[in-house]
Image: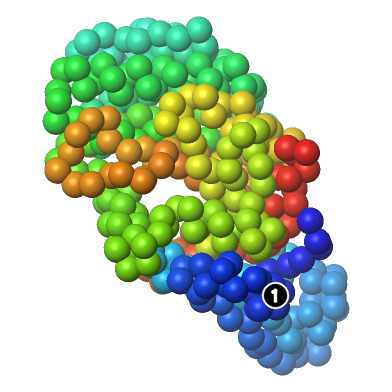
Amino acid sequence: MAERSIVDIEAAVDALPPDARARFDRIYRAAVYETELRAPAEMVAWIERTFGSLAAVQRQRIVRVDNRVTGEGALFNSLRALRPIQAASGGAGADDAARALQDDPWADPYTATPEDTFGRLQGAHGVTAANVARYDGAHSLVIFNEPDPLAFGAETLADHLELAQRWFERVRQDDSRACYPFLMWNCLWRAGGSIVHGHMQAAVARGGHYAKIERLRVDAERYRDEHGASYFDDLFGVHRALGLRFAAGGLEGAAHLTPLKEKELLFRLPASFPSAAEPLSRALHRYVDDLGVRSFNLALLLPPLGPTPEAWAGFPPLARLVDRGPLESRTSDIGGMELYAQSVAASDPFAVAREMARAFA
């Protein structure tokens, strides 16, 4: 893969063959521009130590990419990755996690967590538990037997995914209205995990899918009506044409061109999503072992479990994986821009794609 950067996006798009360029223009628009500032003499030494050169700060290149279909967008400036971050007081990141596991509240989940009214489901590497403070009518946990959330492999991940699938099916047995499944892994506190002990959260909605997944379905359906093509085929096709797609053990993976936050990856999963455990595990290990990620969100966007009033044909199971930043930082990775305007990212999707391609080479 050529050593391309996100700042080269306009040239990369211009070099696409006509069909690929048409797909890109249907989905995205991109712009690269410069911004300038003046630094006082008193700051020069600090700027040079922190950012490498004064020129890099006084003239910066900004990249904006917008998804015309879904309304997602990202602003890129790699200089932001070099910003000084104040460490959290009294904590050492990974050491904090190890200390928390010394007094593990889920050391025995059978006595420390509630269960669903139909009881617990067990796998070889985990067990289900009802969430004590539910955010939906069907909301439970897959609690890992191994408490260290970063001590995982393909076999254990497959077991967790299979257990979640069994839980989805068991919920639907009791309530045919519970039809819209969602599975997520909030790994450690930066990702919203309030308990260090490894666990996933599973939920099934009634009456319609969760709002952002339903919005994606509607957007994809409108795209098909307007262009006579699959949005998801074109989305991954654009990433492939630009060099942002990677073959992930039989899955399609891509470094997202409009990431929610840092190093976001997209995967198109098979209908039986637990079979994706091996490539997902490899991607996660690349994240953890080579990219230094410790806290991440993995979300599975899944089509309904049965017939629904709205159309889901052509909507594939998807996974989104995103880095949530250093454990020791007390600066949130998400602020007002991400909440109310547009995502801001320091990581370069082209660099992320090259790392993932090496993982699956």
Q: Residue at x 31, y 44 (%)?
A: 313
Residue 84, horizontal then vertical, whole percent: 70, 64
**Looking at the image, how many numbered discs can be counted on the residues?**
1
Determine whether, in the image, residue 81 is placed left or right of residue 141: right
Quadrant of the image containing the C terminus: top right
Q: Residue at x 14, y 43 (%)?
A: 309
Residue 195, horizontal then vertical, whole percent: 46, 29
Residue 112, horizontal then vertical, whole percent: 37, 13
Helix, strand or loop under label 1: loop
Residue 337 showing in the rendered view: no
Determine whether, in the image, residue 286 is placed left or right of residue 19: right
Relative to 106, residue 2 above or below: below
**Classed neighbour count for the residue bearing mark 1: other residues with Cα under 10 Å, few (<14), some (14–19), many (≥20):** few
Q: Residue at x 73, y 57 (%)?
A: 351
In terms of image quadrants, where is residue 94?
top right
Relative to 244, residue 360 above or below: above
Disc 1: which residue: 15
Relative to 140, residue 46 above or below: below
| Three-letter amino acid code at the position of disc 1 | Ala
Q: Residue at x 30, y 23 (%)?
A: 168
In terms of image quadrants, where is residue 35?
bottom right
